[in-house]
Image: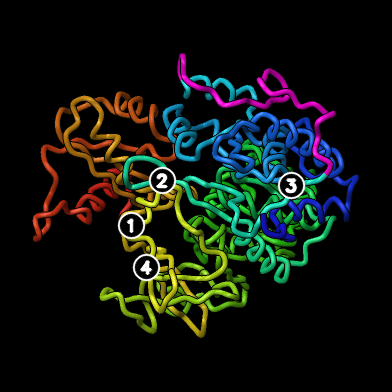
Amino acid sequence: MPEAYADALHTRFLRGLALAPERVAARGPGWALTYRELHERALTWAGALLRAVDGDDRGGPGTVAVLADKGPDAYTGVLAGLCGGMTVVPMSTGFPASRIRQMLDAAGVSAVVADAAGRALLAEAVGPGGHTPPVLAAEGGTVRADAAHALTEPRPVRAEDTAYVLFTSGSAGRPKGVRVTHGATDHYFQVLDTRYPFTPEDVFSQTFDLNFDCSLFDLFCAWGAGATVQQISATAYRDLPGFAASAGLTVWFSTPSAVALARRTGGLAEGALPGLRWSFFAGEAFTCRDAADWQRAAPHSHVENLYGPTELTVTVTGHRWSPQDPQDPQDRAGNGLVPIGTVHKGHDWLLLGEDGEPVPDEGELVVTGPQMTPGYLDPADEAGRFLERDGRRWYRTGDRVRRVRGEVLAYVDRLDAQVQVQGWRVEPAEIDQRLRGLPGVQGAVTVAVTGPDGQTALVGFYTGARQSPAVLVRGLRAHLPERMIPRRFEYLAEFPLNANRKTDRKALRAVAAGLLGTTTP
């Protein structure tokens, strides 16, 4: 093996360990682990995982799935996998068993770290008589974490080795796995280290599930600075100012949907979040109104809009909001949105017109550079997502972007049917395929509209036999995560067609907007 990569992802944690060994690295309701405790636990679990997969016939240390809710087992599992030189595949215990099965198979998982909920879901996913990978758990697993076999230090990796596999919705009716390398994360966190002076005194919110790419920002920005990661539960939003004060939060990161939720629960009063130093939002379009309201509630905080698909390693642009910024929509984004900002250093980008040639002001954003994924687990998923130009490979984001001034970019809309639902990237084609597979359903088209609460909502149209919405929901829940299940279903005798005799999605979005009581398709 070539010389080990000095800046592998797990070295972020080692930096925090050196800075603040007795400070809390991660905590949640009823639990907390210091850097020293989490390090020792992770090395012990890493040794156990490597012994369990010693017979992996593919060579190398293998792939570990972390099937656990945010908590001590999940955080230890992530770090143990990285310390063992393994590829980490975080999975949600909120996913249906069939989806877990697909992810296990696609990633070639050789071991699983699971909590009680994860073990139950794994058993359902594998089914009677199926092959269950070795399972490491604090209690009840098939792999024993024995301190006698703990690693003394993390195993070496190379820059091109895959640190994480993160799954997104796929248009082929199944999730697709994105490979994220150690080299890509190294470049990403170097950019963030330069931009943000985090310290051991910081406390980071973790609103994101660990299978969401933005969770890497929370974990490894915090751990690289010797700071604390604070698990945020749904109940925290009932009194967000009170929770933030009691937890000592200084860094907030969430989807913009959290702003609307905090507004509804009275958490955005002027000066309500005085302890925040940094506030980040990503995963959805960020409106100027939401930015201004959050800034008033957090007057001592920098507020930033971050943007980036998983294929470009978490986020690849950033823009810092200022109350003094002009709010003229024509200047800022053309649609009342905060710009996504400038592309990270070391990357090249282009805006492409409909003919595939560069245009100066508005077009599809394509990016190449050190944060770009080497590809998907299944090369078949790469069709249409990458292009070769000037002897280099570029990622096609599918986002129409406008240059607003200099190198500052603003999001306009999607060029394809892909949508963001609470930060979750959804391919409606996957929903359509599952919907068509239900008894009595012949055709299916899912569209996204803005609901009266300002959130993106999915509406599923179908033909065939009229079905009870409860029956459709129950059928989809067997295959899709909750966020991918349409909020409403509508039966049609036939789909409307446009002038080209294709399904008129624009007309369906207008109908969907009316069904949800909004005039914004």
Lateral position of residue 21 relative to residue 180, left or right: right
Identify which residue is drawn at 43% across, 52% down: 420
Q: Is residue 142 magenta?
A: yes
Lateral position of residue 120 relative to residue 421, left or right: right
Residues at marks 3 and 2, CA–CA distance in whole angstroms: 32 Å
| Mark 2 or 4, nearer chain start | 2
Q: Return the x and y of residue 186 as percentages of the image width and height.
A: 66, 62
Q: Return the x and y of residue 310 as percentages of the image width and height.
A: 51, 55
Mark 1, secondary structure of its residue: loop
Q: Residues within 10 Å of mark 3 (few under 14, many from 20)?
A: some
Q: Of the residues tagged 4 and 3, which is closer to the observer?
A: 3
Residues at marks 4 and 3, CA–CA distance in whole angstroms: 35 Å
Identify which residue is drawn at 71% across, 20% down: 139
Mark 2, secondary structure of its residue: loop
Task: Specify start and end residues of the magenta stretch as a single range.
Answer: 127-152
Residues at marks 3 and 1, CA–CA distance in whole angstroms: 35 Å
The answer to whether the residues at label 4 and label 3 have Cβ atoms under 8 Å apart is no
- Residue type, label 3: Arg
- Mark 3 sits on what residue? 155
Q: Is residue 35 magenta?
A: no
Give whichever of 489, 188 is nearer the camera: 188
- Mark 1 sits on what residue? 383
Task: Please tell me the numbered disc located at residue 387.
Answer: 4
Name the main secondary structure of what is drawn in magenta: loop
Visible residue check, residue 32: no
| Mark 3 or 2, nearer chain start | 3
- Residue type, label 1: Ala
Lateral position of residue 439 relative to residue 400, left or right: left
Q: Residues within 10 Å of mark 1 (few under 14, many from 20)?
A: few
Identify which residue is drawn at 62% across, 77% down: 324
- Mark 2 sits on what residue? 169
Mark 3, secondary structure of its residue: loop
